[in-house]
Image: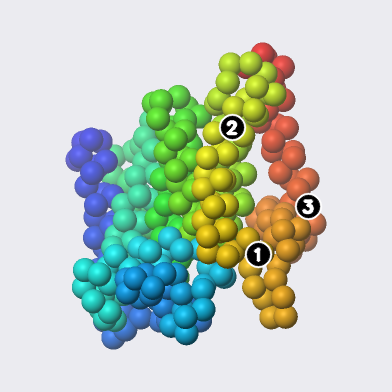
């Protein structure tokens, strides 16, 4: 099979295989935990025209609205049935299989061995179908994330002109899907913009990045304000403050690098990566 044929065949096969496995695993129903029940209530309320609310009428402030908005579109089309919920998430599983396989091809297309992509496709199909099982916004998050990564990669490697804006659009989408990890995506988006934008030194690139990132940040802030989510994520007896959320982001970066022992090194790791990426470029006058 030629490389151009593999570009379309194996990602499509990964999506079909992932969705088939997902369908078999959910032939008797789908798990709906506390988070999923909140998303479903929000989706049903949006479909009913009553806003982003619980069935009790209280506004939903703990979860961003994009996943519920996605589910509400399927409720409008197919009604409030368990099958509709399974099908809506099955579509995301299919898209994940396609997107992640395409992303892998993007990374190795210059060194791709004939037939190698089929192993990637099978692995991704099994992974997403087994991992994304419940009614959670992660299903939508992991559909948008490979597009963000791919657009960022193409931007850095100068493969097109519009990819920065695709990456920023994905960053906004991720922020409206997952509040806990959206900060990490914004850090990544900022890093991409600092690398590729502007023709002057580091200061000019940072100013360009902040100017463009202001668009999704303002949009996110307005959405959070409209939904009453500016006070942070509710917890028993109170809410997480902004400082607590930022600390969790730092801990998450540390966990990624050094697991449990890295929880206090997140910011240091981020600064080191930022310096490695930008200082050499600045010294060359980029």
Which element carries disc 2, helix, strand or loop? helix
Mark 2 highlights which residue?
A: 211
Task: Measuring from the top left, give residue 274's x and y in whole percent.
Answer: 69, 36
Q: Can residue 236 be seen in this view?
A: yes
> In terms of sequence position, does the residue under pointer 3 or pointer 2 come before the other?
2
> In terms of sequence position, does the residue under pointer 1 or pointer 3 come before the other?
1
Which element carries disc 3, helix, strand or loop? loop
Mark 3 highlights which residue?
A: 265
Q: Give the distance between the C-alpha atoms of the residues marked 2 and 1, in whole angstroms.
A: 25 Å
Vertical relation: 72 (above or below) 189: below
**Given this view, does label 3 or label 2 mark the residue nearer the observer?**
2
Task: Measuring from the top left, give residue 37's x and y in whole percent.
Answer: 45, 80
In the depicted view, which residue is nearer to us: 85 or 258?
85
Q: Give the distance between the C-alpha atoms of the residues marked 3 and 2, in whole angstroms.
A: 29 Å
Q: Give the distance between the C-alpha atoms of the residues marked 1 and 3, in whole angstroms.
A: 24 Å
Where does the C terminus fall, quadrant-wise?
A: top right
Task: Measuring from the top left, give residue 17's x and y in whole percent.
Answer: 26, 63
At 65% from the left edge and 64% from the top edge, which residue is drawn?
A: 232
Mark 1 highlights which residue?
A: 232
Where does the N terminus fall, quadrant-wise?
A: top left
In the depicted view, which residue is nearer to us: 64 or 127?
64
Say whether residue 154 is left or right of residue 21.
right
- Mark 2 is surrounded, within 10 Å at the Cα level, by few (under 14), some (14 to 19) or many (20 or more) other residues, namely few
Q: Is residue 108 visible?
A: no
Residues marked 3 and 2 touching at CB (< 8 Å): no
- Mark 1 is surrounded, within 10 Å at the Cα level, by few (under 14), some (14 to 19) or many (20 or more) other residues, namely some
At 68% from the left edge and 23% from the top edge, which residue is drawn?
A: 202
Which element carries disc 1, helix, strand or loop? loop
Residue 244 in which image quadrant: bottom right
**Given this view, does label 1 or label 3 mark the residue nearer the observer?**
1
């Amino acid at each position: 099979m030629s490389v151009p044929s593999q570009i379309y065949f194996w990602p499509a096969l990964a999506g079909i295989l992932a969705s088939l496995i997902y369908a078999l695993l959910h032939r008797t129903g789908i798990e709906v935990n506390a988070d999923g029940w909140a998303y479903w209530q929000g989706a049903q309320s949006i479909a009913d025209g009553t806003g982003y609310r619980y069935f009790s009428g209280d506004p939903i402030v703990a979860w961003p609205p994009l996943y519920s908005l996605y589910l509400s579109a399927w409720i409008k089309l197919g009604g409030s049935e368990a099958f509709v919920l399974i099908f809506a998430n099955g579509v995301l599983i299919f898209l994940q299989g396609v997107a992640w396989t395409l992303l892998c091809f993007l990374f190795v297309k210059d060194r791709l061995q004939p037939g190698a992509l089929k192993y990637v496709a099978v692995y991704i199909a099994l992974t997403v179908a087994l991992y994304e099982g419940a009614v959670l916004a992660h299903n939508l998050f992991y559909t948008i994330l490979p597009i963000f990564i791919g657009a960022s990669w193409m931007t850095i490697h100068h493969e097109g002109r519009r990819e920065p804006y695709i990456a920023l659009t994905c960053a906004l989408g991720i922020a409206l899907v997952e509040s806990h990890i959206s900060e990490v995506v914004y850090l990544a988006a900022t890093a991409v913009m600092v690398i590729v934008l502007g023709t002057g030194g580091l200061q000019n690139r940072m100013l360009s990045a902040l100017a463009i990132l202001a668009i999704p940040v303002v949009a996110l802030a307005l959405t959070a304000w409209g939904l009453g989510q500016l006070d942070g994520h509710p917890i028993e007896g109170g809410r997480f403050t902004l400082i607590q959320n930022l600390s969790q982001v730092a801990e998450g970066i540390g966990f990624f690098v050094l697991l449990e022992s890295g929880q206090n090194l997140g910011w240091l790791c981020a600064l080191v990566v930022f310096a490695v990426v930008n200082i050499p470029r600045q010294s060359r006058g980029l």
